[in-house]
Image: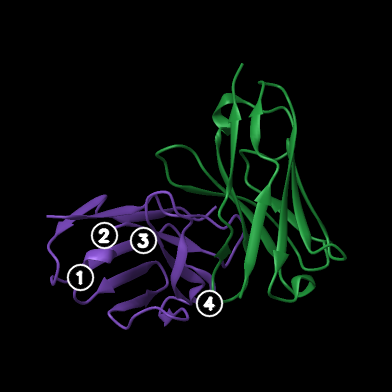
Chain colours: A green, B purple
Amino acid sequence: EVQLVESGGGLVQPGGSLRLSCAASGFTFSTYWMHWVRQAPGKGLVWLSHISDEGSTTNYADSVKGRFTISRDNAKNTVYLQMNSLRAEDTAVYYCARGGQSGLSWGQGTLVTVSS
Amino acid sequence: EIVLTQSPGTLSLSPGERATLSCRASQSVSSSFLAWYQQKPGQAPRVLIYGASSRATGIPDRFSGSGSGTDFTLTISRLEPEDFAVYYCQQYGSSPYTFGQGTKLEIK
């Protein structure tokens, strides 16, 4: 069974930084692309970024390009999202998800609140 | 960027009725890499349909997907009480992997 557990969320001031982690189990992590998706309170889903299975390819939504960095450690079965220069509009639940031809499989999410 | 537009925004139906949800893309979706997700309050989304028409593991056969190119449909043949939720389409054929804005399926 695919399990994805996000951590690292919390309260951060505008302009601050946070690193999210997502620990994966139940599948061969090193063979899947991984994604981050967020959902602001009461709003829809927004795809943010993905990273290839070996970590050599990354892509970002325009809204976070230059501020967020995705990375992975296949030895630790973990994907990360480094978030810098955070803004109030980055407040959301952040989900990591496993990619693949059968769509995304999701973690339970971690809440990030950007506020002074 | 491929923009996905879902309609209607809200759909009010009764249990036992048929639901038809639409997802229209601004450009052709590559190789029908179109998925549908269901999200209930306080929960993460879960995949229902992938590849436009393939049901994910464990999804009841009352859920079906169809379409290609720029027009896709999710059909729920007979609504059960647990089907009332928000539904999102997503294209995963070209980056950025965009979502539609969602359709809320509510009890009439």
For badge 1, the amino acid type reads: Leu
For badge 4, the amino acid type reads: Ser
Q: CA distance from mark 4 to mark 1?
A: 29 Å
Mark 1 neighbour density, 10 Å: few (under 14) some (14–19) many (20 or more): some
| Mark 1 or mark 3, earlier in chain | 3
- Asked if residue A97 is positioned above or below residue A41 in the image, the reply reads below
Rendering coords of residue A52 (x, y %): 76, 64
Rendering coords of residue A112 (x, y %): 60, 36
| Mark 1 or mark 2, earlier in chain | 1
Q: Secondary structure at mark 4?
A: helix
Q: CA distance from mark 3 to mark 2?
A: 22 Å
Between circles 3 and 2, the one closer to the viewer is 2
**Disc 1 and disc 2 in contact, CB within 8 angstroms:** yes
Rendering coords of residue A29 (x, y %): 75, 71
Residues behind callouts 4 and 3 on a single chain: yes
- Residue at 34%, 77% (x, y): give it: B66
For badge 3, the amino acid type reads: Arg
